[in-house]
Amino acid sequence: MASQKRVLVFSPRDKEACKSVVRKLQQENVIAVDCEGVHLGTKGPLTLIQIGTINGDVYLFDVMKDEKEQDKSFFKDTGLEKVLSSPKIVKVIHSCSGDSAALFHQFGIKLENVFDTQVAHLVIAEHKGRRLPYRLKLAELCSTYSDTAKVYEAKDDVKLEWCKIENDYWAKRPLTQEMIDYASGDVTALIPDVFEKQKRYLEENGQIDKYAEMVQEEIEFHIDPAMKEKRNVRHDKVRDAILSDMSAKYRPSQEYSAITDEDEIKALKDINVRDISAQPRVIQNLKHGQIRTFLTELENDLKTPETFISPRNLDQKLHDIENYGQEEIRKDASRLRKQVCEVVTNDIQRKYTPNTPVENISESDIRVLRYIKPISDDGPSYFHPTVLALHWKVEEHDIDVAVENLRVDPEYNVSFVPKLKFLCFNTKVPQSVKGRATRLLQMVESSILTNIPRKYTRDTPLDQLSETEKTVIRDIRTKSNTFHPTIVSLHWRICYDGLCRDLERYKEGKLRLNSGLEKKLVFFLNNRSVPADVKKKAKEFQQYLLKAR
């Protein structure tokens, strides 16, 4: 962008002045756009939108009535809605999916005619030979495509501020000079240099059609599930092709540390730990090497907790390694997961209050709040009152979302039934959570037991049932004699399958003997209604336990 002339800030109290500016913006052919918010996205509230012009003017539009409430009519009242949805004005945005989601779900605005510099970079990188190019931060993008475009120098420090200390940084009012400089820098960096260089490359190399298809996916990624699926399918197809090439290229003895090809490294990173066993041995070995490297790097990052920011999916990665990784790295994953939890809970108690709405909590923090166990069989656990309050608030929120989804779709899969049972029957769970959990569990059980005879037969392979269905059917009490014969048959087959799995896990040292397991074996052996094959397997299990002792 040309040297910056001015930055003007408008609030919902300045709508008439906004209208005057918007009329000028409607005459522009190209504008740069960016949004800020509190964990901006589908639900994370948008609080500020910034627009820059080719000649260097920057306009910051504050959409907050106060620090708590958005002005939902701001875009319509000022005419900004027409600018953002205009097919005539090019909106240059870097990674527009989050902005697009917030505008659509919170204000009903669908972005049109977007030039996404992130998507353009991916298309250009692929045209130059990359197969799985990495996404770039805005500062990296600027240095790649321009000698002059710069973001706000203290951008990383500001991000650290809202990630570690002040969660609602972008909802604070009035706007500080730091906030104004940061926000304006994100649009002045995009035009004209970066935009014009990328656009010229796409046009000269016949990549416009491919770009147009991919940018539409970016706009609708959090709006249309089909778009998200389309992008994921394309990514997985490329990743699998790279892995196939690698399995032919390398021997099983190949060390991960010797891999230098960035596409190969990214393909390995993108394998879900749960899916490792389906890969050829050479890929399995390389993936395990990548996991060890990942854990080592994480351990180094945790040595400076004051600057550590947990990535969105970190807890899920560590959970998967802890449960599906190689035996020797499971303990490391478990240990590091606890360390991450400690760092994140320390941040949580500092940057939130017990009254913080769930939609204002980051996804990575929500995952940690779900992970903590304030009630444990291993003894009492102490958590800061803010952490504890938000833990139960997240539990309530998850239950409320599941209830609503189940009302809309009776076959919606509620995946946390074991947790629901714990919440229902543990006396230390707050009553508000217990009541919600009880209602949801009743809904789930009623829905599943009603639908099972329609969906399945007695001989349906168990892998066709969801884990939730198997849990509900497994836990019925057959003595009541009120269940459909299909349900009863599936119940005993699930019990038999569970005994087989438990016995194997016990033999491998992955399952410890506990009172619940002992009671289950006694019940199977002594109850007359238990089928012969289940009794036989329970007896085999008991005899193995006696020998092991």
Image (cartoon, rainbow, N blue to C red):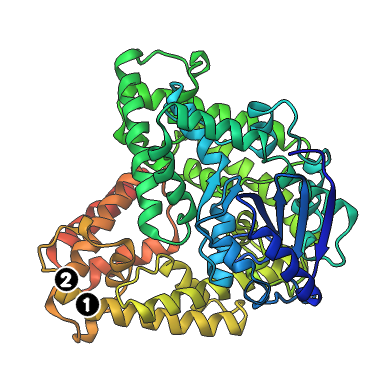
- Circle on res. 451: 1
Mark 1 residue element: helix
Say whether residue 47 is left or right of residue 218: right
Residue 236, image quadrant: top left
62 vs 292, nearest the viewer: 62
Give the residue type at disc 2: Lys
Q: Is residue 101 above or below residue 97?
A: below
Residue 452 in percent (x, y) is at 20, 74
- Residue extending farthest right: 177
Residue 201 in percent (x, y) is at 51, 28
Q: Residues within 10 Å of mark 1 (few under 14, many from 20)?
A: some
Residues at badges 1 and 2 in contact (C-beta under 8 Å)?
yes
Q: Residues within 10 Å of mark 2 (few under 14, many from 20)?
A: few
Residue 513 in percent (x, y) is at 42, 54
Quadrant of the frame with the N terminus:
top right
- The answer to whether residue 411 is visible is yes
Mark 2 residue element: helix
39 vs 74, nearest the viewer: 74
Which residue is labeled 2 in the image? 455
Task: Name which residue lies at 79% across and 43% down.
Answer: 155
Task: Name which residue lies at 35% across and 40% down.
Answer: 234
Task: Name which residue lies at 37% across and 32% down.
Answer: 239
